[in-house]
Image (cartoon, grey):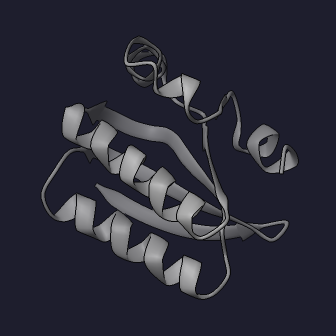
């Protein structure tokens, strides 16, 4: 998994791409979120448009990310998931805990 960061209207957009699974990927996302939280950047949108696969460990990465950001007083939004990833998030009821938007722009605008 690759993680790219950009800023849009004072919101951090983290572009995730590839397979979101356990291992070093979890540390990569966790370290990035802690760094952002320390800098006071706690409005985060995870752009899932280029995520090709996610397993249960990948879901754990998203839950951990949500917890980290909420503990820092912020919020995480998910955006632009493919149909396959959207179905996974819905079936596991993660969409009951974190908002999922059709586009990054919609997620950014909702802050």
* Residue closer to the observer: 59 or 7: 59
Q: Residue at x 47, y 70 (%)?
A: 33
Total numbered labels:
0
Q: Tell me residue 32's x, y (percent).
A: 43, 74
Residue 78, relative to residue 82: is it above or below?
Answer: below
Split into 4 quadrants, where in the image is the N terminus?
Answer: bottom left
Which residue sits furthest bottom?
A: 39
* Residue closer to the observer: 44 or 15: 44
Q: Residue at x 47, y 55 (%)?
A: 67
Instruction: Write down the quadrant of residue 53 in the picture.
Output: top left
Q: Residue at x 56, y 47 (%)?
A: 47
Q: Image check: 31 left or right of 111?
A: left
Q: Residue at x 81, y 71 (%)?
A: 10
Q: Image check: 6 left or right of 32?
A: right
Q: Tell me residue 45's x, y (percent).
A: 63, 52
Residue 71, relative to residue 61: is it above or below?
Answer: below
Which residue sits furthest left?
A: 23
Residue 105, relative to residue 64: is it above or below?
Answer: above
Q: Tell me residue 71's x, y (percent).
A: 54, 64
Residue 44, relative to residue 77: is it above or below?
Answer: below
Q: Image check: 29 left or right of 41?
A: left
Q: Tell me residue 3's x, y (percent).
A: 41, 63
């Amino acid at each position: 998994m690759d993680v790219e960061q950009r800023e849009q209207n004072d919101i951090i957009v983290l572009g995730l791409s590839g397979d979101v699974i356990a291992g070093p990927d979890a540390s990569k996302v966790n370290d990035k979120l802690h760094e952002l939280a320390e800098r006071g950047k706690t409005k985060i949108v995870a752009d899932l448009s280029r995520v090709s696969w996610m397993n249960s460990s990948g879901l754990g990465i998203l839950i951990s990310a949500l917890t980290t950001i909420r503990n820092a007083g912020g919020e995480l939004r998910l955006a632009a998931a493919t149909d396959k990833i959207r179905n996974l998030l819905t079936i596991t009821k993660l969409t009951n805990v974190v908002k999922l938007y059709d586009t990054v722009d919609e997620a950014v605008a909702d802050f």
